[in-house]
Amino acid sequence: MQTKVLTHDHRKIHKEIYGEKPGPVRIQRMPQLKYVIQEMNTAYHMDWAGRPEPVDQQWIVWKIVNQLKHITKTKIDYKFKLMPHEIIWHEMNDNLATTTQVMQVPDCITDEMFEEAQRNVAKNLKDQIPDTKLITADSVLCAQKLHVGHYRETKTTLLEVIQFAEDQGYQVKKSHREIYLTPAMRCHDSSTWKTIVSVELV
């Protein structure tokens, strides 16, 4: 009899990050985590359900992570849920934003698995795909807060996070991270959307 493969939910494994509840700003240390990332310089459609959508560049990260899900399940019996879409916002220039698109993946992902996933996506799309990387991000100290409502309105929460961190004597890095917890589905009213707003501290 075949044993059912356990599905690993990394939102629960890293609930100190992805399980943020409504409440005050918190300062905490982010653990060392592995991500698939894609650098972009693009305009964003800011009324896409659940998360911003790049206008003139293709977001390919989630397709690669979907391939990684299949590869780990097949090769090492490790099944995991797709993690939330994250964007690190670096700089705005007119209507263009310099960003890093991010999706967290398990530590068991190897360079060989990642390269295989890239090849599979390119083959499925029958085209060359945008550059993506598999990285391991160092543990960092951050301040974060859960924003409830449309992600277009996260600026107020970001200012609150920055002010709190500075009041505690920290310096704040220029870039900030938004983690879009609400699935990109029209059935969710925008007043209920949940976005974690985070800044790295030095």
Image: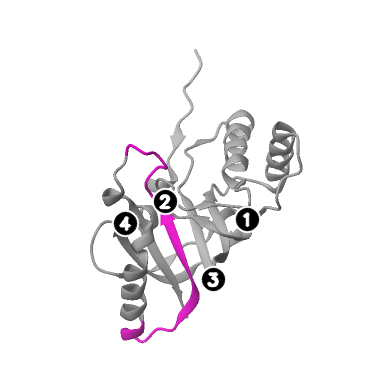
Amino acid on which disc 2 is placed: Asp
The residue drawn where x is 43% and y is 71% is 199
Could you tell me which secondary element the residue under label 2 belongs to?
loop
The residue drawn where x is 38% and y is 53% is 18
Q: Residues within 10 Å of mark 3 (few under 14, many from 20)?
A: few
Badge number at residue 20? 4
Residue at far left of view = 23
Q: Position of residue 63 (x, y in %)?
A: 60, 40
Residue picked out by circle 3: 92
Residue at far front of view = 94
Residue picked out by circle 1: 38
Mark sitting earlier along the chain (1/2) = 1
Residue picked out by circle 2: 47
Amino acid on which disc 4 is placed: Glu
Mark sitting earlier along the chain (1/3) = 1
C-alpha separation, residue under disc 1 versus residue under disc 2: 21 Å
C-alpha separation, residue under disc 3 versus residue under disc 4: 27 Å
